[in-house]
Amino acid sequence: MSPSAGDIITIIGVPLAVLGVLPILYNTLATLAALSKIKRMLRHGKLTALTRSDIINKVIEVELPRYAVQPWDRFASKEYWQISRQPSSIPGGSWTTFNWKTNTIGIKTQRVEYADQLRQPQVEVEFHELVAYLLDLGAIPDAHGWRLLRSTGLWTPMGCALMKSPDSTSVAMAIAPLDDSDGHLSLKVSWKPSWTTRDASTLPPYWIRLPPPPITESDESPATASTSQEGPQPEETSDAGKNQEELGDDKKLSSPKQSLDSIQKQADRNARLPITCQFSVDGLQSALSQEQGPPMSTVNVHSLHMEHLRVSSHKMNGKWFASAATAYGTTSQTVLWNYKIPDEILAFARRDTVPCGVLELLGVVDDSMTPQWATKHDDHMQDHESFVRSSQEHRIALAAEARMDPAQRQIAIRQRTEREMMQRMNEMRDRSRRGAQRRETRRHEALQSPKWSTSLVAEHNLNWLRGRKVVDAEFALREVVGMLLHRMVLDGEFASAICEMLDVWKAWADNGGMRNTDLDILEVRQETFAQASLLVALVKDATGAHEGTLTMDLQECLRMWRVVRLGSTSSA
């Protein structure tokens, strides 16, 4: 029996229909499997995402939030010092290595076919906060990487290391691909718990600690007496209301006295405690004094008045202080990279501006320490000739008087005495005038004498201060500068005097040299000038390296990129 047309259609059509449905079934199963794997990856990374799937076209759509992140508070949060327990394994999620404070700033939609095509969006972070965070944990900047980043920018090779682990064997932060950076600098990070070598008791980056001056016996104030003095009071009075009024007046008078006494006690305590100062790219941000407790904790911390040291466009005080404090910080274990000393101050500190003759006039050095700069005057022969001439005239006059009769002799003696007196007065006036002219000439020659470097000037000024017992002989230049900066924070008048002297000094350096008016100022305020020279010398010593050093490269990179993208489109 031959098959009918219906049988033929069934035999051929059913398999064909099944074959036509198989791709759809495969796409459905593959899409569901990929979707399940993506959801599992999102759950493991604790990521909140919206997923949609098109089983026909085998497309999975994932909406992931984009974050802006910043580190937690280093003193109040344990997460700051710990890495994440469940970092994301999705490519691009290297930033989840650390715990961050996050803020959603947008949504990124991705359409993928397979789970391994999913990418976690990079996050935005302030570059200086990221660098400070890694430095605070113990990371070490890589000089080559920062130099390369400064010179080539976004063309820096992928994988170039910027920060390394404390043992310098592993990469902690490196350049990442630019696929998801939208023109920003793209970075990726890596960290292990064993790399964390610091804690909350250490001084954070961008902070410095200024030591207080040593306490001497003269500084120790005696115990404060009672703030109120009781006068003689009558034992008995018939007017009880009058006694109550007098008691109220005593309380009113003692209240302001107690307030002033409390302020004075706090000022005395601040003068004996270290001061920690925070700096940003804009200069001094805060100054804190801590009485007791672990270093850099929030226990017994007092915020100090420091408006007189803020950077402003009207005065140079803030720039002078920030520059000196930056130099003081970068010459110690403190990592203070973000404030850039102005070029004008750097050029001034590196220039030789103080004539050596001026230091000799001020009594800082003697003539054996300086080259020959003044004209030598030898008045011995001239004085000898004048004495011989006067002696001869005196003998001739005495001989002539001896031949005279008594009346004429008396007249001659009187005339000779008057003549010799006038001659001596003329000689005194000539010597005085000659001395004044020579002193003026000496001042002029001192101003034109060879100029010494700032370091040499500071060295002699430090010895001069030690000789006057202004500073202890046991302290080196850097230690003295730290104490001067400590005093500048607490004493606004002292800070203004130092900065005004620096302004005068910089003005004569910019205007071609010192003048008589500048020398007059130094003679009146010599101690202030000596202290100011120590600050300038430290700035020169700390920034004497050439362009391209790690400090300069890191500061320039932080200035060029305020916000960066953190993460990586390759596997973390």
Image (spheres, rainbow, N blue to C red):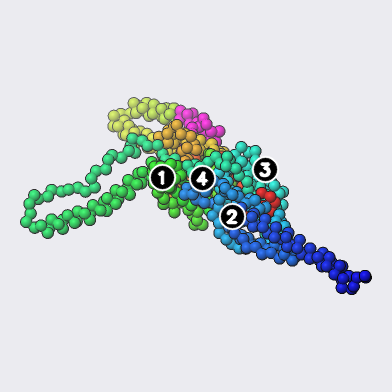
Q: Earlier in the sequence, mark 3 or mark 4?
A: 3
Circle number at residue 144:
3
Task: Calculate the distance from the C-alpha at mark 1 to the C-alpha at mark 2.
Answer: 40 Å
* Amino acid type of the residue tagged 3 in the rendering: His
Identify the residue under disc 1.
Answer: 290
Left or right side of 286 for 511? right
* Amino acid type of the residue tagged 2 in the rendering: Lys
Look at the image and give the residue range highlighted in magenta. 361-385
Q: Residue at point 58% right, 40% down?
A: 195
Identify the residue under disc 2.
Answer: 46
Confirm whether the magenta stretch covers residue 474.
Answer: no
* Amino acid type of the residue tagged 1 in the rendering: Gln
Identify the residue under disc 4.
Answer: 204
Residue 471 appears at what percent x and percent y? 42, 36
Task: Calculate the distance from the C-alpha at mark 4 to the C-alpha at mark 1.
Answer: 15 Å
Q: Nearer the viewer, mark 3 or mark 4?
A: 4
Q: Quadrant of residue 27?
A: bottom right
- Element on which disc 3 rests: helix
- Element on which disc 1 rests: strand
Task: Calculate the distance from the C-alpha at mark 3 to the C-alpha at mark 2.
Answer: 36 Å
Residue 557 appears at what percent x and percent y? 63, 50
Left or right side of 549 for 241? left
Q: Residue at point 93% right, 70% down?
A: 2
Circle number at residue 529:
none
Could you tell me if residue 81 is visible in this image?
Answer: yes
Kindly check if marks 4 and 1 are in contact, taking CB atoms under 8 A apart as contact: no
Q: Earlier in the sequence, mark 3 or mark 2?
A: 2
Other residues around mark 1 within 10 Å, as few (<14) / some (14–19) / many (≥20) = many
